[in-house]
Image: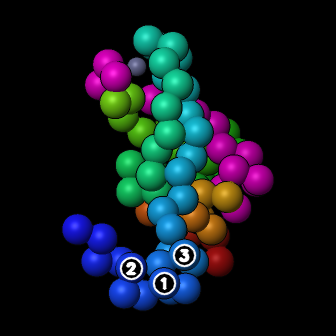
Amino acid sequence: MREMSAMHGFAASMAPVLFKAACPDCRSRFELSASSLRLAIGASRRTTFYSFTCPECGSSVRKPAGERIVELLTGGGVRTLRLHTTV
Ligand SMILES: [Zn+2]
């Protein structure tokens, strides 16, 4: 069932990026794909955060995202929501 094998080199560069995350509620650790994460960029650092739903307990987790995390997430293809347009 590995249809991707038809496109070797291409598939390698398109490998899904996994982000390590932990849930503050149930304390489980897991890896999330880019599609499970959401990034919200606000006007200030305090309103910039990423969120995801814990696959273990189902609670929605929201964590502040620093510049590095923002770069990492956007580079990994995480959906980004801009709360304030400051251009
Ligand atoms: Zn949890």
Query: Where's residue 69, x and y in %?
Result: 69, 50
Q: Which badge, 2 or 3, is on the more N-terminal residue?
A: 2
Residue 78: within the magenta? no
Is disc 2 in contact with disc 3, using a CB cutoff of under 8 Å?
no
Res 8 label: 1
Front in this rendered view, residue 55 or 68 = 55
For disc 2, the neighbor class at 10 Å (few under 14, some 14 to 19, many from 20) is: few
| Residue situated furthest left in the rendering | 1
For disc 1, the neighbor class at 10 Å (few under 14, some 14 to 19, many from 20) is: few
Instruction: Report the amino acid beneath label 3.
Output: Ala
Compared across the picture, whether 80 is left or right of 71 comes to left
From the image, tell me which residue sits under label 2: 5
Give the distance between the C-alpha atoms of the residues marked 1 and 2, in whole angstroms.
5 Å
Q: Is residue 45 above or below residue 55?
A: below
Magenta segment boundaries in residue numbering? 56-71
Compared across the picture, whether 6 is left or right of 32 comes to left
| Residue situated furthest top in the rendering | 26
Instruction: Report the amino acid beneath label 2.
Output: Ser
Is disc 1 in contact with disc 3, using a CB cutoff of under 8 Å?
yes
Report the residue at 32% width, 19% height from top. Answer: 57
Residue 64: within the magenta? yes
Q: Would you say residue 48 is visible in this rendering? A: yes
Give the distance between the C-alpha atoms of the residues marked 1 and 3, in whole angstroms.
6 Å
Report the residue at 44% width, 12% height from top. Answer: 26
From the image, tell me which residue sits under label 3: 12
Name the mark nearer the viewer: 2 or 3: 2
Instruction: Report the amino acid beneath label 1.
Output: His
Is disc 1 in contact with disc 2, using a CB cutoff of under 8 Å?
yes
